[in-house]
Image (tube, rainbow, N blue to C red):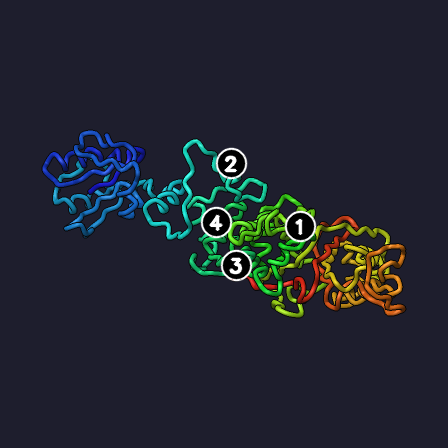
Amino acid sequence: MAIVKRDCPTCVLVGPVLADMQSTGANVRVISQDDPTFPDGCSDIIDDRELALSWHNDIETVPTLVRMVDGVETERIVGWSAEQWREFTGQASLGEGLAEYRPGCGSLSVDPNLAAGLEAKFGGSGLAARRVEFAVLEDPVEAMYERGWTDGLPVVPPTVERVQAMLAGTTRDSSEVIAVVPPDLVECTVEKVAINAVMAGCKPEYLPVVIAGLQAICTDEFNMHGVLATTMSVGPIFVVNGPIRSRLGMNSGINVMGPGNRANSTIGRAVALCVRNVGGGRPGDVDRATHGQPGKYGLCFPEQEESSPWEPFASSRPTGAIDAGSNAITAFCGDGSQCVVDQLSRDPDSLCRSFAAALRAIHHPKLVIAFDAMLVIGPEHARVFAEAGWDRAEVIETIDRYSEAPGSELFRGAGGMAEGLPVDLGDQRLAKCRPGGLLIVHAGGGAGLFSNLIGGWVSGAGGSEPVTVAIGS
């Protein structure tokens, strides 16, 4: 058989040769990829515009001449070579007057714009997920809204081709169960993560980060079921460390927790969609947040390690710490962020006092010990500590100390506020966060003496613990 296409000069060159071969009785089946009337002069041309024959026979170049014996390929010639074609056919005068050699053109079956669709159509997708067919007149984006698969923003339709491309971003088997997702405790495979990553707008190279993020929150320590069920506004916040930040082009600088960067914007969203679409964690159902906050769409950002005065955040964690230089993601259960403004402090002690004052206001000034917090220190504030030689531990210890207040100011009724501790502890001083509950990350734009505070949910065994997970391949 000979596989050709009209849109190929070499195929046009050998068209008369194929016609001559048929006219002399040679048993040659001509298969045309783009025009069932091409080549001129040939008979019984097989129409392969769907490219099924070309795909199944691994045709990479046209023209290709293939000898089949009892359904088995025994010989193949690619392009036009007068010597090879004459030897192949046994016709010594075949193609007289033509150039001795001409390379072929790319087969349509390997066209980058078509290859993924052909693989999905003919190769067997290998996907186990249930297929949903939309009516011809349905808009897929609107249809996914109607079926409740979105977070309120448009999602990308997860076609077979897109999911297969997404799965190429990981070495894991698509059927591997990587987490049991609350609240419905549904086993989530790599394939299901890939589907939601497509919907979120991720690139394939983001998939290992999404997988690690989902694994981090689907742990007893993080307590995702409780995070959903609480009426507070909290949700998972992810911090990425390691070389993968640069490989994915993540933004750790200007607008680090805002819009504008695809990886920052879609990785956390993909995890949130997995919780919604796989685990059943839908707002108004199990998700009972009184107000919610924009970060619940999915907040993920990388630490700015290059200019940080401290070791990477993931390496500083007391449990589950990851070696510096390794890829890791940390999940923290956090609320909306608030800007901390101090444009005058030039010594670390003064700056820590400002941070402590802002920290005390998180959730309520009289509620202490119960809540963790994440302080995202901007580069200009971090420079104050770097110039003074303060490490992360010293910064945390100082902020904790300045955040202390006497029990007499914290009990219920003190200051005319009914909220507070159930008993008056007198002169006993209590810090805002439990020991180890204040987390410090370095990120943000290089201009502006600003940092950012993110209040946490109930800390410890009754609430949520930050979880750090290594990012695999």
Name the mark nearer the viewer: 2 or 3. Answer: 3
Q: Quick one: label 3 or label 4, which is nearer the N terminus?
A: 3
- First reached walking from the N terminus: tag 1 or tag 4: 4
Horizontal relation, residue 30 to residue 114: left or right: left
Mark 4, mark 2: which one is toward the viewer?
A: 2
Please give the name of the residue rendered at 86% of the width and 55% of the height, measured from the top-left corner: 417
Mark 2 packing: few (<14 Cα in 10 Å), some, or many (20+)? few
Q: What distance separates the C-alpha of mark 1 from that of mark 2?
A: 26 Å
Choose mark 1 or mark 2, whichever is in front: 1
Depth check: 384 or 291 in front? 291
Q: Residues within 10 Å of mark 3 (few under 14, many from 20)?
A: some
Q: Which residue is mark 2?
A: 142
Label 2 to label 3: alpha-carbon separation? 28 Å
Q: Amino acid at mark 2?
A: Glu
Q: Is residue 63 visible?
A: yes
Splitting the image into 4 quarters, where does residue 381 fall? bottom right
Q: What is the x, y in percent for residue 396? A: 77, 65
Q: Amino acid at mark 3?
A: Leu
| Placement of the N terminus among the 4 image quadrants | top left
Depth check: 145 or 160 in front? 145
Q: Which label belongs to residue 195? A: 4
Marker disc for residue 289:
1
Q: Which mark is residue 49?
A: none
Looking at numbered disc 4 in the image, what kind of residue is underneath it?
Ile
Left-right relation of 267 to 27: right
Q: Which residue is mark 3?
A: 185
Q: Are marks 1 and 2 in contact (CB under 8 Å)?
A: no
